Amino acid sequence: MNKLKSLLFALTTISISAQLFAADAAPGNIKLWPGGKVPGKVCPMQESIKPDPSIKKLTNISNPSMDLFLAEGNGEKPFVIICPGGGYAILSYDLEGTELAQWLNSMGISAAVLKYRAPDNRDGALQDLQRAVRLARRHAGEWKISPDRIGIMGFSAGGHLCARLSNTFDKRHYEPVDEADNLSARPDFCILGYPAYLAADKKYTMTDLFGISADVPPTFVMAALDDKAWVDSAIAYALAMKKAGAEVDLHIYSKGGHGTGIRHKQDGKPMRFWNDVCGDWLKYYALKDLKDKK
């Protein structure tokens, strides 16, 4: 019986992986590195999905890419690159990725979900996000997006990743590979959902992984007090931005937990309103004055 269960599990994993690779071949999947020449460390194992009945968990990502979700309608659109969370071990691809892309599309904002390298490859993930921002600017005309309205959005570990790029966008994280790498990697705005790993202690002191300056893009930060592991991370980052003179909006809710994405609308907890508030924030930082450009 145990052998049969093992066989069924293996077949399920193979089937799910095949579906994933089929989706990757569809139009709208953009490989980040030409010819598959990925700089730095890569995972030697085959890309797969970890079985989970409620969340699509990707892992073993060695050929990073982004899936495009382009909003309908005429004129240039703002563009947001979404970095799902998962402790740098997996990517919660639908919960903190595709579902957010669809929400952004409903506001007239185009998006992409970033499949950055995992597991255990923070520097590789940073290279992937920096490259993704530059590729977005390179293809702005083709994708009908505004090259000066390109933002990033991350959750948990993905929030940490976005915070790193927000503060190190002007540093060379990889050697240039084509003309896209001549373009700026600075995001125009940033959204952090319950970001992780940013507080060094319980006194809201920032981690020393990177410094914060006034050049950090305008940032929206949200978390819940009952997210005991990481709420200090959100507060520490917002306070550091305030001290640096950067623009930051911090929203702390009494209840909401961790790893909810936008699935919490029906649970009655206060954090269920976060994306409504974020939507208003985006109207100012991403959508404002775009009518004049059409």
Image (cartoon, rainbow, N blue to C red):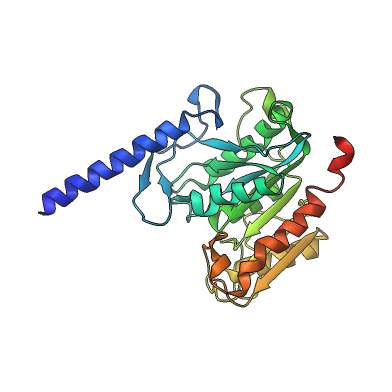
Looking at the rendered image, the quarter that the N terminus falls into is bottom left
Q: Residue at x 72, y 65 (%)?
A: 238
Q: Quadrant of residue 180?
A: top right
> Percent position (x, y) of residue 235?
67, 69
Horizontal relation, residue 29 to residue 133: left or right: left
Residue 105 vs 85, above or below: the answer is: above
Looking at the rendered image, the quarter that the C terminus falls into is top right
Residue 136 vs 251, above or below: the answer is: above
Please name whichever residue, 49 or 177, is drawn nearer the observer in this view of the structure.
49
Does residue 239 appear in this view?
Answer: yes
Horizontal relation, residue 249 to residue 175: left or right: right
Q: Residue at x 30, y 39 (%)?
A: 15
Q: Quadrant of residue 185?
A: top right
Work out which residue is located at the far front of the displayed protein and give it: 73
Q: Residue at x 54, y 74 (%)?
A: 228
> Percent position (x, y) of residue 192?
65, 57
Q: Quadrant of residue 53?
A: bottom left
Horizontal relation, residue 39 to residue 171: left or right: left
Horizontal relation, residue 124 to residue 190: left or right: left
Please name whichever residue, 41 or 87, is drawn nearer the observer in this view of the structure.
87
Q: Residue at x 66, y 67 (%)?
A: 273
> Percent position (x, y) of residue 25?
46, 28
Does residue 44 appear in this view?
Answer: no
> Percent position (x, y) of residue 264?
55, 66
Q: How many marks?
A: 0
Residue 271 vs 156, above or below: the answer is: below
Work out which residue is located at the far right of the displayed protein and give it: 292
Please name whichever residue, 30 or 219, is drawn nearer the observer in this view of the structure.
30
